[in-house]
């Protein structure tokens, strides 16, 4: 059974297949309206979500299917002590695919070993968030293609799962990756190791000014307050690496400013109305990209039955 657990396992070919399908859906959504009529997608979110959960929900319904929602941890039997393995084993009997978000790194991989329906990792702690990466790549590709690019990734590179997935996926393309963060929030050692092994062109910076003028894309991320073991450490860093219109004076005119959202104060609202801002478009791209992903996973699962 195919699952989507980590962007580290995605090839260029598999990424382009999903992005091409998303483009076809964007061009003719009506052709996909009954594609998976009767299919059910289970939404199991052990952590809060707006975009991922709602866009998967919309995507499944636009493919003609329906969704079942576990609800919150508080309102589910997780509150009574049910394990993740038991939860997904039960849920696979109710659904044709599962989308899982969980606070523990590795949870999606572990859960996938207990089920025979496709499982999508919608975020596992500070680990991975590969479906976010697919919509990020779709958004980048629409304006600039995916080769011969300089991409800056800034903010919380240590805990940011969207960063880890994007960094892995970009190794499939001719992309110079620039990581901009305070020393304490550098990319984790395992991700740095993977990038090094892949031969990716990688540089690390503590200062955005040094690299901003050469960037095609600046991917800004939130400092993940909920993952800091010590609240004081968070407060020492919060507010650094903020983008406003003045910061962007040094940027190229065609820079794309992206953000997986939610933002706190990393991007000043005044940037929203500039040509740089791509983050709301990026969030909206979640629907066609997740339709494409679900279409691929469900079609493959049906063929294997
Ligand atoms: N980008 C993202 O994962 O947003 P949510 O946490 O709202 O799903």
Image (cartoon, grey):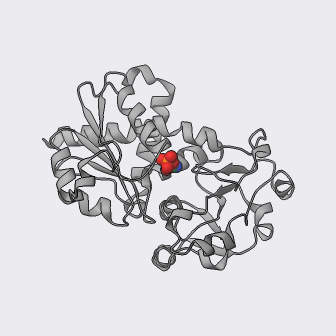
Query: Foreground: 25 or 283?
Result: 283
- Name which residue lies at 62% across and 39% down: 280
Image-based side of 297 in relation to 132, left or right:
left
Q: Is residue 95 left or right of residue 19?
A: left
Pick whichever, 243 or 169, lies toward us: 243
| Position in image of residue 9 (x %, y %) | 37, 62
Residue 6: % across, % down: 38, 60
* Residue at the far top in the pictured view: 30
Which residue is located at x 45 percent, y 37 percent?
Answer: 55
Q: Is residue 241 above or below residue 89?
A: below
Residue 211 appears anywhere in the view: yes
271, 239: nearer the viewer: 239
Q: Could you tell whether 20 is left or right of 214 in the image?
A: left
In the picture, the quarter occupied by the C terminus is top left
Name the spot of residue 189 as percent of width and height, x first.
49, 80
Rendering coords of residue 170 (x, y %): 53, 61
């Amino acid at each position: 059974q195919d699952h989507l657990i980590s962007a580290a396992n995605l090839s260029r070919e598999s990424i382009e297949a999903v992005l091409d399908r998303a483009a076809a859906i964007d061009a003719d959504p009506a052709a996909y309206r009954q594609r998976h009529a009767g299919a059910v997608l289970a939404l199991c979110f052990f952590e809060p979500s707006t975009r991922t959960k709602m866009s998967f929900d919309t995507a499944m319904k636009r493919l003609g299917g329906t969704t079942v929602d576990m609800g919150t941890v508080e309102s589910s039997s997780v509150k009574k002590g049910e394990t993740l393995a038991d939860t997904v084993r039960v849920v696979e009997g109710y659904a044709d695919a599962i989308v899982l978000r969980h606070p523990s790194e590795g949870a999606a991989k572990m859960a996938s070993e207990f089920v025979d329906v496709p499982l999508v990792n919608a975020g596992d702690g500070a680990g991975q968030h590969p479906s976010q990466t697919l919509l990020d790549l779709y958004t980048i590709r629409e304006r600039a293609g995916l080769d011969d690019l300089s991409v800056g990734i800034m903010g919380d590179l240590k805990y940011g799962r969207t960063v880890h997935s994007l960094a892995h996926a970009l190794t499939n393309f001719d992309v110079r990756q620039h990581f901009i963060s305070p020393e304490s929030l550098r990319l984790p050692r395992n991700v740095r190791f993977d990038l090094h092994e892949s031969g990716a062109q990688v540089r690390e910076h503590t200062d955005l000014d040094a690299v901003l003028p050469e960037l095609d894309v600046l991917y800004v991320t939130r400092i993940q307050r909920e993952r800091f073991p010590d609240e004081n450490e968070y407060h020492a860093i919060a507010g650094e690496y903020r983008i406003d219109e003045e910061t962007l004076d040094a940027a190229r005119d065609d820079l794309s400013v992206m953000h997986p959202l939610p933002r706190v104060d990393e991007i000043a609202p005044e940037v929203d109305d500039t040509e740089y801002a791509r983050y709301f478009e990026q969030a909206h791209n979640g629907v066609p990209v997740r339709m494409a992903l679900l279409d691929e996973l469900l079609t493959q699962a049906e063929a294997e039955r």
